[in-house]
Amino acid sequence: MTAAKEIPTPAPEPVLREDQVDYTPTARSVSLSRHRAARLVLQWGHPLMAGDVALVVSELATNSVMHGAVRGRLFRVHLTLTEFVLRVAVSDPRGERLPRLDRPGDDECFGRGLLIVAQLADRWGVEQRDVGKTVFAELSVR
């Protein structure tokens, strides 16, 4: 019998740029967070990603406002850039309302946000927090 080998965990990539802002859960905040994300990605030297990142932020922030809002609590948009990945993370206080990927009917007006995120991102998911949840999307830096 051989001893089990411990597989080392890879070291996390160093963060090159980072931005984090808390917003009130309103439609205006969705617009503000989308514009801020696009501007930052441009400033960080990735102009071809700015539109996709803005759309991902908009969809995740909209979901947070519509499904994750709690009166008197903020939601957070956190952008992290490493050499290989730009991560968009949106946190809100409603941990019991987890997002799910739906396939809405052709006549339905809502329900396509996560489909858009899934198409644009290389990876997306949900992380539980002590209070609330974080929905994230990661886009490969091209």
Image: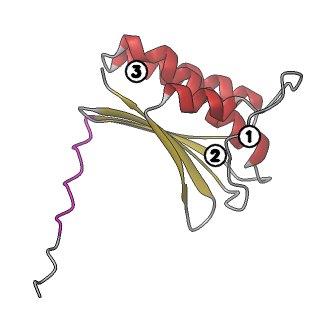
> With 42 as the anchor, is 60 left or right in this view?
right
Residue 82 higher or lower than 13, as above or below: above
Distance from disc 1 to disc 3, alpha carbons, whole Å, reads: 23 Å
Does residue 33 show up? no
| Quadrant occupied by the N terminus | bottom left
Q: Is residue 14 magenta?
A: yes
Circles 2 and 1: CB distance less than 8 Å?
Answer: yes
Residue 10 higher or lower than 130, as above or below: above
Distance from disc 3 to disc 2, alpha carbons, whole Å, reads: 20 Å
Q: Magenta segment, principal secondary structure?
A: loop
Does residue 60 show up? yes
Q: Which of the two labelled residues, at mark 1 and mark 3, occupies the earlier sequence position?
A: 3
The residue positioned 84% from the left and 22% from the top of the image is 106
User: What stretch of residues is rendered in magenta?
Assistant: 7-16
> What residue is pinned by disc 1?
65
Q: Which of the two labelled residues, at mark 2 and mark 1, occupies the earlier sequence position?
A: 1
Residue furthest left as drawn: 2
Please rate how many residues cluster around mark 3, counting C-alpha atoms within 10 Å: few if below 14, some from 14 to 19, many from 20: many
> What residue is pinned by disc 2?
75
Distance from disc 2 to disc 1, alpha carbons, whole Å, reads: 8 Å
> What residue is pinned by disc 3?
41
> With 33 as the anchor, is 5 left or right in this view?
left
Residue furthest top as drawn: 47
